Amino acid sequence: MTCHITDFIDMHCHILPGVDDGPADLAQSTTLAQIYTQAGIAAVVATPHFLPGTSWATPAATVHRLVDELQHHLNQLSIPLRVMAGMEIAFHRKLEQRLRAGDVLPLADSSYYLIEPAFQGDQGECVSLLTALQLDGFHFILAHPERIEGFQQSPHLLGQLAEQGVLLQVNTGSLLGRFGSTCHRIAAELKEQGHLHFLASDAHDAARRGPLTATDWQQILELPGGPELLHRCCQNSARLIFATDDQAPHDPSLFRNQQP
Ligand SMILES: [Fe+2]
């Protein structure tokens, strides 16, 4: 089983300038892009926060425009990073309405939406709505559920969601123990259960919460089951982003039971 960092696609990062708590301007976005390419990473999905009622609710058209502008800028500088459009959509009262209206973006033109559950509180409403919307044909990835209090207290809900086809994205920092012992434990459990479908950096800046580095990659490789995990995550990203419609049936087993 061979998997290299060049196969990795960062499915969750804040690289667009001036829209959330990520880079403040194009120069900072460019610095993040350079860190990615220095590590050998060639593609990312830009996932700015979409948090209605705040200044972090960038319209879909603006996300597309900013992705195009950043891509153009990187191309001009010969920085070989492909940037695709997405959103980290906070779970909110009008989520269903906005999904049905097409006001929020899936990841990289796939049919999967990255949902960030509320950090505090019971997750019953979130689980119920996502389950109902799945039955209507929507597909979801949960952003860093290992960091969410309600799932930390009821981790069986994550197994339940995964079994019904909600995909789970864990932060690399959680898996490497940088978000505390609880996040570390939940991330490790998801890995062992085969319910860790995507690793992502959730990068915000160059210093405090940066992109995945070659050192991070090596540390994950050295974890028990690390090579298999990275292989699966890389395959899953490629499946989600590059598969044509008839190659991407929405069978959750495809994302967890893959052969090298
Ligand atoms: Fe994020």
Image (spheres, grey):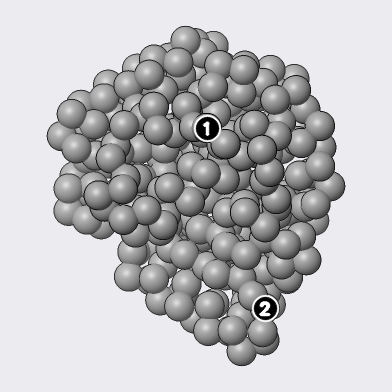
> From the viewer's perspective, is 116 left or right of 112?
right
Q: Position of residue 8 (x, y in %)?
A: 62, 52
x 38%, y 19%: residue: 163
Quick check: 12 left or right of 179? Answer: left
Residue closer to the observer: 61 or 159: 159
Classify mark 1: helix, strand or loop.
loop
Circle 1 residues within 10 Å: few <14, some 14–19, many ≥20:
few
Quadrant of the image containing the C terminus? top right
Query: Circle 1 sits on which residue?
Result: 259
Dot 2 amino acid type: Ile
- Quadrant into which the N terminus falls: top right
Residue that appears at 43% across and 63% down: 85
Position of residue 95 in the picture relative to residue 114 (left or right): left
- As drawn, the label of residue 68 is none
Residue at horizontal 19%, vertical 37%?
137
Amino acid beneath label 1: Gln
Residue beneath disc 2: 79
Dot 2: within a 10 Å radius of its alpha carbon, few (fewer than 14), some, or many (20 or more) residues? Answer: some
Q: CA distance from mark 1 to mark 2?
A: 33 Å
Q: Residue 213 versus residue 25: which sits nearer the camera?
A: 213
Q: Is residue 121 above or below residue 100?
A: above
Q: Residue 75 at what x, y percent from top left? A: 59, 84
Q: Position of residue 147 (x, y in %)?
A: 59, 28
